[in-house]
Amino acid sequence: PSTNFVDRTMLFFRDTRSSAAVDPDEIHANQFAAELLMPERFLNRSLRGEMVDLEDEVKLEELAKLFGVSLQALMYRLINLNLARHQA
């Protein structure tokens, strides 16, 4: 991975292969991390059996903070568990 510095903070960027989601090890590692950080039963308990609207930024930010994860990670997990909906 490449390394950049912004405001004296070191940033690491993923290489093209890992960000393309084609490496089976990377895929399994991401699944493991999602299950560890956001267990399905705890998400269900937090949602009280309801689905989350992907446009509800307040609810998404609340859940992301609760589980200590990024919004993107939370949204992927909710979608993969069929716990999200999108109101058009």
Image: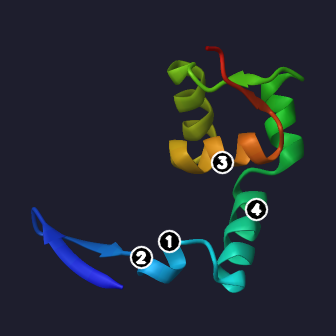
Q: Looking at the image, which residue is at 25% across and 81% down?
A: 3
Please give the residue where the numbered disc 2 appears in the rendered image: 14
Residue sitting at the far top: 88
10 Å crowding of disc 3: few (<14), some (14-19), many (20+): few
Type of amino acid at the residue the image marks with label 1: Ser
Type of amino acid at the residue the image marks with label 3: Tyr
Give the answer, above or below, for where 6 lies relative to 17. Answer: above
Q: Secondary structure at mark 3?
A: helix
Mark in front: 3 vs 1: 1
Mark in front: 4 vs 2: 2
Horizontal side of 1 relative to 56 (left or right) equals left
10 Å crowding of disc 4: few (<14), some (14-19), many (20+): few
Q: Secondary structure at mark 1?
A: helix
Q: Position of residue 15 (x, y in %)?
A: 41, 81
Please give the residue where the numbered disc 3 appears in the rendered image: 76
Q: Position of residue 30 (x, y in %)?
A: 67, 68
Circle 3/circle 2 CB separation < 8 Å: no
* Mark number displayed over residue 36: 4
Q: For the N terminus, give its image quadrant.
A: bottom left
Q: Position of residue 70 (x, y in %)?
A: 51, 48
Which badge, 2 or 1, comes first in the chain's sequence? 2
Q: Quadrant of residue 34?
A: bottom right
Q: CA distance from mark 3 to mark 1?
A: 14 Å
Circle 4/circle 3 CB separation < 8 Å: no
Which badge, 4 or 3, comes first in the chain's sequence? 4
10 Å crowding of disc 2: few (<14), some (14-19), many (20+): few
Type of amino acid at the residue the image marks with label 4: Leu
Please give the residue where the numbered disc 1 appears in the rendered image: 19
Q: Quadrant of residue 13?
A: bottom left
Q: Looking at the image, which residue is at 52% across and 20% down?
A: 58
